[in-house]
Amino acid sequence: MRIAVAADERTGIADAVVQELRRRGHEPILHGALDDDERDDWAWASEAAARDVAEGRAEQGVVCCWTGTGASIAANKVPGIRAALCGDAPTAAGARRWNDANVLALSLRATSQAELVEILDAWFGTAPSDEPGDRANIEHVDAIR
């Protein structure tokens, strides 16, 4: 799977995210501080990754900044993106199941290597819900402008 990955600095789990995605057989598309030719600020990097997802160049995205909050906000400004800031595996599973989240936002500061693995296990191991109420919520979120 092609996954757009953005970080505003190469600290914390920034490089570990890319390595773990590759270990799992995914193809990371790098943005921000992960690409020497791009602007590394969180707003620009997260937007670039989110646009890859929204425009079909990537199936999903992972955006990272110090807290993960700014990266999530920037990604969510791109139409069609449902970015979720996840600090643990149950939150990641819920974001995929109930929100059909297509961009995972992570904190470079607060996410450990062990948590990263657990979060990615939950993210990739959980399918979006087919329940009518859940689908109605997702469709409504997508329609909000």
Image (tube, grey):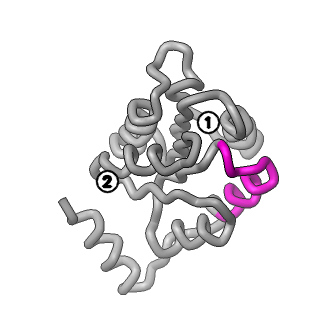
**Separation of residues labelled 1 and 2 (CA atoms):** 21 Å
Characterize the magenta stretch by its predominant secondary structure.
helix
Residue 96 horizontal side relative to residue 39, left or right: right
Q: Quadrant of the N terminus?
A: top right
Q: What mark, if any, has residue 27 been given in the picture? A: 1
Q: In this view, which residue lies farthest toward the right?
A: 114
In the displayed structure, 134 sits above or below 36; it is below
Is 73 left or right of 8, judged from the image as shown?
left
Give the percent coordinates (x, y) of residue 131: 43, 84
Element class at badge 2: loop
Write the start and end of the magenta stretch as one range.
109-122
Q: Which residue is drawn at 51% across and 38% down?
A: 4
Q: Which residue does the image show at 45% across and 79% down from the upper left?
A: 130
The amino acid type of the residue labelled 2 equals Gly
- Badge 2 density bin: few <14, some 14–19, many ≥20, Cα 10 Å: some
Q: Which residue appears farthest toward the left when viewing the image?
A: 145
